[in-house]
Amino acid sequence: MELTLFYIAAAVAIAAAALVVTRLNAAHALVWLVVALLAIAVIFFLLGAPFAAALEIVIYAGAIVVLFLFVVMMLNLGRRSITRERLWLEPGMWIGPAILTAILFGEMIFLIASSDTGDAGSPVGPKAVGEALFGQYLLAVELAAMLLLAALVGAYHLGRRYLRDRREEAS
Amino acid sequence: MELNWSYLLIVPLAVGALVLALFIVWWERRLLGWWQDRLGPNRVGPFGVLQALADMVKLLTKDDWLPPFGDRVFFILAPAIVVGSMLMAFVIVPFGPGLHVTDSNIAILFFLAMSSLAVYGVLLGGLSSNNKYAMLGGLRAGAQMLTYEVFMGLSLMGVVIHAGSFSLVDIVESQRGMWYVLPQCVGFFIFLIAGLAESHRLPFDLPEAEHELTAGFHTEYSGMKFGLIMAGEYLAMMLTSALVVTLFFGGWLGPSFLPPVVWFALKTALVINFFILLRAAIPRPRYDQLMSLGWKVLLPLSLVNLLVTGAIALAAAD
């Protein structure tokens, strides 16, 4: 039962991810990206990580892609961008990435075939995730938080300079 | 994975929520009429109760127009996302002891996930209409919902600290001693405001503010698609009320002379009436006021609330 659900979700994720790459309209590609993220959330849930599944939807599908869509709406991409996208997606473009991906795919098959994957893992509840994050990995969490704070200050600085220029223009 | 009898609740829950949303429209119009010293709809049936039915018949028989200049797929998808995500979120609401579709240890996160997916309905509706007003409304809705989601989640974490669980059943059970509205009153007010902004109802209905944006993101919608968007808004209000009751007012708990489900329904009805009263009482803020209230006041406040709650919980644990 769970294996069937996993294969369905995995198939949806792969199909949606392929459509993200090949869509010419940016908004359509983003909606397919949301579908792919939802499928990955289902896979997380099936693997016994409900907390990761919920955060996948709340943060990636619900916040980050919304911001992407937001930018796409602001840019007001028209027909011109679709023709440009079509030019970028020429058949010749596929060769390089396809070779590199094939190498990685081969490596992955080799690793799966050669290593022992008998351990199916055990479900991890929200509490266990919290304990791991703020116990064992506290330093990494704090470092990531510092990095995000730096990004926040940087974004604020850029926004403030833009606003100051606008104010000077107005006066 | 064995099938549970509580899954039988899904269909009556979905149908019941939609029908109730219809009648809340009538109830809201009657209440607003009463508060504003006029009658409101009172012609169809006793006290005008059947007005909701008449409205539905009107919406269903109207011409369902698709804008030829827009994106047809997104245009059809958007109302479905609005209603679908809200109905999905109802599965975690415990209506009484044992009376819930599912009780999981990520229930609150599931609610936050569904309410964040509801943004897509509004954004795609605005994008696909290919219309200036709809676009502006969609952008506003996106920014507003994203902003208020941030501390909607943060405001609930105080309750989670108190109860020690994300499960709504556990949260209700742990309120036997005291309702969380007292120790978490800051969290309660923030959640109330965030819930209001999430369901973009007056006074926070700037995505569809008719004085500046005609009807905002649903300007181009007509017929049943418009009806679905409206239903989604009322479903969001019902869901927020149900969660306010569950998280802060003890859910189904109450003196034993009434069954638990009735207590839950009464409390939820009271909160819904409060939301309607807010609509009648408070004028719309300006859009930049709404955003700066969110980022500059409510976000720091919810962080401080979380910090203090955490410190107290830590001190009590020692």
Image (spheres, coloured by chain):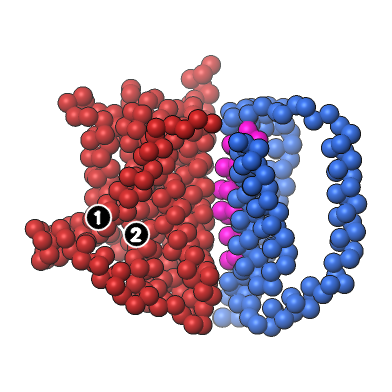
Shown in blue, the chain is A
Type of amino acid under label 2: Ala
> Alpha-carbon neighbours of circle 1 within 10 Å: few (<14), some, or many (≥20)?
many
Q: Percent from the top left, x then y, of residue B146?
A: 52, 56
**Amino acid at dot 1:** Ile
Label 2 belongs to which residue? B231
Residue at left 49%, top 49%?
B114
Q: Which chain carries label 2?
A: B
Q: Is residue A65 left or right of residue A136?
A: left
Secondary structure under badge 1?
helix
Picture quarter containing residue B37? bottom left
Q: Do the residues labelled 2 and 1 touch (CB within 8 Å)?
A: no
The answer to whether A145 is drawn above or below residue B131 in the figure is above
x and y percent of residue A79 in the render? 65, 82
Q: Which of B18 and B134 is in front in this view?
A: B18
As displayed, is residue A135 above or below residue B192? above
User: Looking at the image, which is closer to me, B291 or B152?
Assistant: B152
Residue A161 visible in rendering = no
Magenta stretch?
A47-71
The percent position of residue B42, horizontal first and vertical second, equals: 11, 64
Query: What residue do we see at 57% from left, 42% from top?
Result: A54
| Location of mark 1 (residue) | B24
Q: In which quarter of the image is residue B49?
A: bottom left
Colour red belongs to chain: B
Q: Name the side, left or right, on which B50 lies relative to B195.
A: left
Asked whether, in this view, residue B75 is left or right of residue A2, the answer is left
Is A134 placed above or below B131 here?
above
The earlier-in-sequence mark between 2 and 1 is 1
Give the CA distance from mark 2 to mark 1: 10 Å
